[in-house]
Structure formats: structure tokens, C-alpha cells
Amino acid sequence: MIRQLVINPGSTTTKVSVFDNDKEIATATVEHNPDKLASFEKTSDQAPYRLEAIREFLKENDINEESLTGIVSRGGITKPIAAGTYVISPEMLKDLVEAKRADHPSNLGGIIADIVSKERNIPCFIVDPVSVDEITDVARVAGLPECSRHSMSHALNIRATSRKASEQLGIPFEKANFVTVHMGGGISVCPVSGGRILDANNANEGGPFSPERSGSLPLASLVELCYTGDYTEKDIKVLTTKKGGISAYLNTNDVREVLAMVDDGNETAKTVLDSMLIQIAAEIGAMATTIDGKIDGIVLTGSVAYAPYAREKIGKHTAHIVPIINMAGQMEMEALALGGLRVHQGKEQAKEY
């Protein structure tokens, strides 16, 4: 039996699970004190503090650390890499600690896993980080040589739900074609073909706006905004990636609250929400063309997919393409565990960073 500790750090929480083979035997979302987190100079400095909370979780569930045979964590902002399960190497660890590409909480996953791995002398991995980059050369051309497009997506959940959809349809994952949409605080719309994410809107830079992100903006207006003198470069990045989209219009990033506004007859909320959903549908249509419209299903995942209103609105505008496959929520913990398990069982070779 393979017993794995699975770690998925967020901004103020850490999701933790323990899996025996493919069965989750314990799980929790550990809350962290925001003031305590803010006291650390760098995100990587939080690792010992978060690890202490993870160990408390293990004790509460009567799980002895010595029983663990492996650790798998959410991948951080690594260099662009192919999809798969990776050994946490010294080079990867250096990139995560130094936050060479972004100082993001996800970087902590590999850092914490490495600490426990060295203490217990057990293997540690990451699986399908957001920096998975297998998009085509054609997809990289943006319109200016100085502004190439880069892949950044919810790759872990995108690939996991696409894999599950292919199983439901009885099609080998390596032969299936989907447009898979992760809808959370950010939105990723990706054509998944032959097991690869061939394109991605990069939720931080374009595509539909989301509960927190502005998505694609009118270029001239954005340039003018940057030169008003009212914003620094950091301000603009925060505005477009954390305070944009629905949040900018309705002062909330919670789609459940927006749906309640719509139910109460708030026409502004309805217009904003419908606009986001129609933009998602339009992006689905655009991504379908990248695989010649030959897709087996449109997979909707993420927290927003729980809302029937959202699924129905998107489905209305995409019904002419192919039916929707609803996989609301996230499969991240399961996807991490299964990625590590495939390596432990010899079904997949762990990749080197």
C-alpha cells in the first residue's frame, strides 16, 4: 500500500489529505492566521509555520508520519515545463524558494514536501503545476514580438477533469478532445487534445473576465489608464488580477452572492454575470476552432460550475458545438494523489525538472 501526504497551499489556508492508494482517508482545509502569515518577509519563510499545522492535522487523525511512503504537493510557479509528475529536485527547490517567477503561495507546496521528504527519506513530487506549457508555437504569437503569449492555467484540475471525462465517455485520454473550462477566482479555457493542453487564455492576462481578474481589456483604454499617473505598475497588476472582473463591478468575488443579487432583481448584477458567462462561451467557441471543432465534450469545472444558472447560460450558447459535461468543484487533491500513485506503481515515469 502507498500512503501519501498531499499538500495544496493557498493564500491563507493549506488543504491537506492523506491517501491510501487512491482512497482519501483524511482531509482538512487548515486555516492560518493572516496576521501571522503577513509577518513573514517572504512567502517561502512560511513553510515551518504551515508544516506545524499540517503535523497537527496528522496527530488529530491518528496518522503517524512514519507510516507515510510518499508526499505529493501542488506545483508552484516553476519554469515552463511539460505536464506530468516531477521529482522535487534541488534546482526546482531553488526556484521555488527564490520565487524567481512569482512569489505565490503554491510555491510552498514543494518546499514543505521537501522538508518532510528529507526527514523521512521518502520520495516527494509535484504534479501539473500552473506553469505547465505545452501550447503550440502558433498559439504563442501575440501580435508583437515583445509580447509573446505564455501558457499559465489551472493545469492540474484541467487535466484531471479531462482525464475523468474521457473515462466516462470510454475514450482513451490520449485520443480524446475537449474544451475544458476551470471557473473559479480565475478562469482557464483550454483545448485538451491527445492529453496535452494545446492553448490557454492565461487567466492573468486575457480571455473572459472572472470573479477577480479583468481578462482581456480594450487596449487603448488600458494604455491610457497606465499613463494617468494614478497607478504604479504594481497597482495595475493588482487591479487586473485581484480586483478586476466581477469584484470591480459588484464589490464581491463570490459568485454565490452575485446569484443572490440576480434572484433579488438586481439588473446590474445580472448584466455583469451574463457578460462573464457569455465571454466564457465565446472563448469555448474560439478554443474549439484550434482543434478543428472536433471535440468530444465541453467540460465545466471549478466552483462556479456548481451554479445551474452558469451551466445553463454557457450551455445555451455552446449547444451547437457539443454537450456540456459537468464536473463542478475541484479534483486537485485526488489528481495530486493519483499523479504520485502512478509513479509509485510504475505506471508512469517521474520527470526531472
Image (tube, rainbow, N blue to C red):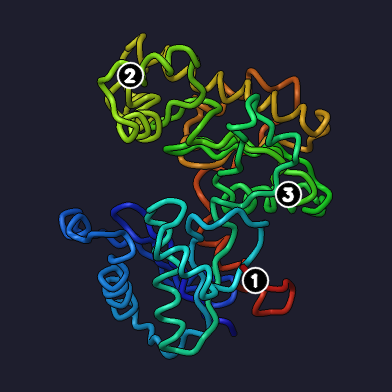
Q: Which of the 4 image quadrants contains residue 228?
A: top left
Picture layout, residue 29 above or below residue 57: above
Q: Is residue 167 left or right of residue 75?
A: right
Residue at numbered disc 2: 249
Numbered mark located on residue 196 in the image: 3
Numbered mark located on residue 352 in the image: 1
Q: Residue at x 32, y 12 (%)?
A: 266
Q: Nearer the viewer, mark 1 or mark 2?
A: 1
Numbered disc 1: secondary structure: loop
The location of residue 185, given as percent across then percent down, is 42, 38
Residue type marked 2: Tyr
Q: Which of the 4 image quadrants contains residue 325?
A: top right
Q: Residue at x 38, y 53 (%)?
A: 103
> Disc 2 to disc 3, how far (Cα)?
35 Å
Residue type marked 1: Glu
Mark 2 vs 3, N-terminal side: 3
Q: Determine crowd level at label 1: few under 14, some 14-19, many 20+ residues with C-alpha closer than 10 A.
A: few
